[in-house]
Amino acid sequence: MSKYDYLVVGAGLYGAVFAYQKKKQGKNVLVIDKRNHIGGNCYTEDIEGIQVHKYGPHIFHTNNKQVWEFITQFGEFNNFVNSPIASYKGKVYNLPFNMNTFNELWGVTTPADAQKKLEEQRGKYADIEPKNLEEQALKLVGEDIYNTLIKGYTEKQWGRKCTELPAFIIKRLPLRLTFDNNYFNARYQGIPVEGYTKLFESMLDGIDVELNCDFLENRERFNNIANQTVYTGGIDSYFDYCYGALPYRSIRLETEVLNQKNYQGVAVVNYTEKDVPYTRVIEHKHFAFGEQDKTVVSREYSSEWKVGCEPFYPVNNQESLELLNKYQLLAQKNKNVHFGGRLGLFKYFDMDLIISSSLESSALL
Ligand code: UDP
């Protein structure tokens, strides 16, 4: 007899939602995580009274009412709306691509003039079937925006040429002919008032959690501890990288406390020039309209992931899809282990999709 019904490896969003649902169904669950904290990459830490997003900015947004109702039962959310700024060669531009951006770039003031300009810019790409991110971006917004706001940022973030990246990545960004700087087309949006960590504490309340515990280094101990295992680490790591490592991007945040109230006036500034070594600068207090005397700022650097680093973004392309398929075939042979989350499924998911996929699998497994 196993002690637990479920072992959940990883106390991030997918794992915590799964564990909560299973506990609600009356099951016995053990959650383990190799880090010394819960929350996965959503983890926030209080520095100078400011909730610092230790693994990069996490702005919750969704159109899914069920997901919104689910997550907000664990804590109050504020009404933060993400309106990041792009900085290119000393000039700033509004994001996503909207009337403010078109005005800043081309001086146009009406939707009709912006439309005309956009058509001029993307005209020659109108009929192409985009095969990569560059072609998709040129078809969507044309040359000026591609060169000013997309190319440098994307190539830094992904460490690959835009011609070697899948088109879908750029489709995440809205394009609007209104003066609306809301980065997301989402009905519900916000940040947990007391930080994400509190939210996870509430989700995992009453569930056994073991931190500083690396599943891969203690496989024998966990082999028979539960009837079913939910693994939210990299699917390649579970199989000891037997076919080679899947490609991920890693990020590094250089964080400092500044003795000033307001550093950049907005939560996120994207540096879209190739020559600026970091991708973006995050000023955490602005996620919560903070009034503290000091401020905490993080510069985000992107790099290729190597075994031993923290994987962040799966690089979804044809080559990685083929490798992923091989791992998934192995996974299918093992009926008692299920893979979930951004790493387990090797998919560039937003938080709300992680929640809905975890809710779905917790109802099925
Ligand atoms: N992107 C860009 N310029 C920007 C912001 C984003 O070119 O200023 C591109 C980039 O390729 C990125 C994609 O749009 O990978 C999606 O951006 P999003 O903000 O959704 O990425 P996230 O930070 O959520 O992963």
Image (cartoon, rainbow, N blue to C red):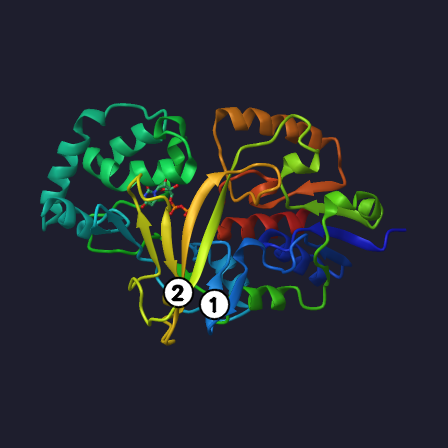
**N-terminal label among 1 and 2:** 1
Residue in the image at 33% along x and 71% along y: 260
In the picture, measured across the screen, residue 227 lies left or right of residue 330, that is right
Q: Are marks 1 and 2 in contact (CB under 8 Å)?
A: yes
- Residue 231 locus on image (x, y percent): 68, 45
Q: Amino acid at mark 1?
A: Gln
Q: Quadrant of residue 182?
A: bottom left
Q: Residue furthest right?
A: 1
Q: Is residue 142 left or right of residue 312?
A: left
Element type at marker 2? helix
Disc number placed over residue 51 in the picture, else none: 1
- Residue 283 position (above or below residue 174): below
User: Can you identify the residue that label 2 sits on?
Assistant: 287
Question: Which of the two residues, 13 or 157, is positioned nearer the viewer here?
Answer: 157
Residue in view at x 64 percent, y 31 percent: 328
The residue under label 2 is which amino acid type? Phe
